[in-house]
Image: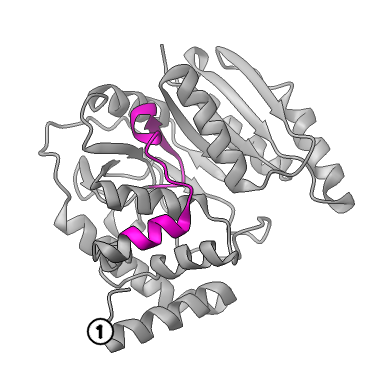
Amino acid sequence: MRCPVALFAYRRPEHLRRVVESLKANPEASDTDLYIYCDGARGRKDRAEVAAVKAYATIITGFRSLTVITRNTNYGLSKSITEGVTELCNKYGRVAVVEDDVLVSRSFLFWINAALDKYESNERVISVGCYVFPTYQNAQQTFFLGVTDCWGWAVWKRSWDQYESDGAKLLNLLTQRHLNQRLDLDGSYPYTDMLRGQVNGDNDSWAVRWYATAVLSGGLTIYPGVSMTQNIGFDGSGVHCGTDQSYKVSLSDRPINIENIPVVESAEARAAWADFLKQISQTNSTNSPLLSKMWRWAKKRLTLGRSH
């Protein structure tokens, strides 16, 4: 049976429609169970758009089955994703995860299922990634990286069971094991400060906690050589994204064959990731006050030679 897909939506019906259409374009869609988690409105101003999302979700066709889970209250992205992923991992043992601003390629479901099958019993592989930065397209067919993905990804229950929701615990363990610099991708991006911000209540990022969990476990994510997903949320419509075209990529138009490569991190990919994020952090920090603040903290720590 194909891996089920969890699609998380909030208040963008047109974005959701585009994402669903991209999923339906996959040949495997008709054999795939689709679960749509529709979050509740934050207030009166969101109710109409939230209602439109829920109305559209109920009439979707083209999949083996459709299950729509509607929330009467606003869960927020972190609670929505962590509870939904846990629920489907417990039911199926694996799940693919997409949000309402992540378009997928026609090969997305093929890639997800092939990678999940191949590395199901290899505990070093913690997840399947799909988004590849534009500076690293066509590098090779597949590669491993010690960085998790949050723009279209998949996971097994065996690895998701490791997810640690306690940010303070993660931060302490990273510091004790001198892994802050590794979390920050060798100083290229202030993930440690993002995690510290989560602990302090400045953000509620599930993704940084999942990434920190992976770093502590030494887990690797398998990636395709060409991106399988594209984030279309950098148009000012989202709650957590501003306006930015830096992450725009061309999607793979063909299936990616998973080669028998050593399960070790690609030094070349890690260096390319670090270079790209460093450029993004420095040039785009003005678009996000929180990112600008985190980047100033990170640069100060790097200047002082501190690893945390």
The structure's colour scheme is: one colour
Closest to the observer, 194 or 268: 194
Is residue 86 in the magenta section?
no
Query: Residue 308, position in %: x, y?
Result: 33, 73
At label 1, the amino acid type is Gly
Horizontal placement of 58 versus 143: left or right? right
What residue did someone put label 1 on?
305
Could you tell me if residue 100 is visible in this image?
Answer: no
Left of 212 or right of it: where is 240? right
- 303 in relation to 201, above or below: below
- Quadrant of the rendered image containing residue 271: bottom left
Image x and y of residue 287, in percent: 57, 74
Disc 1 packing (10 Å; few <14; some 14–19; many ≥20): few
Q: Nearer the viewer, residue 151 or 19?
A: 151
Residue at figure coordinates x 45%, y 40% from the top left? 152
Which stretch appears magenta?
A: 149-173
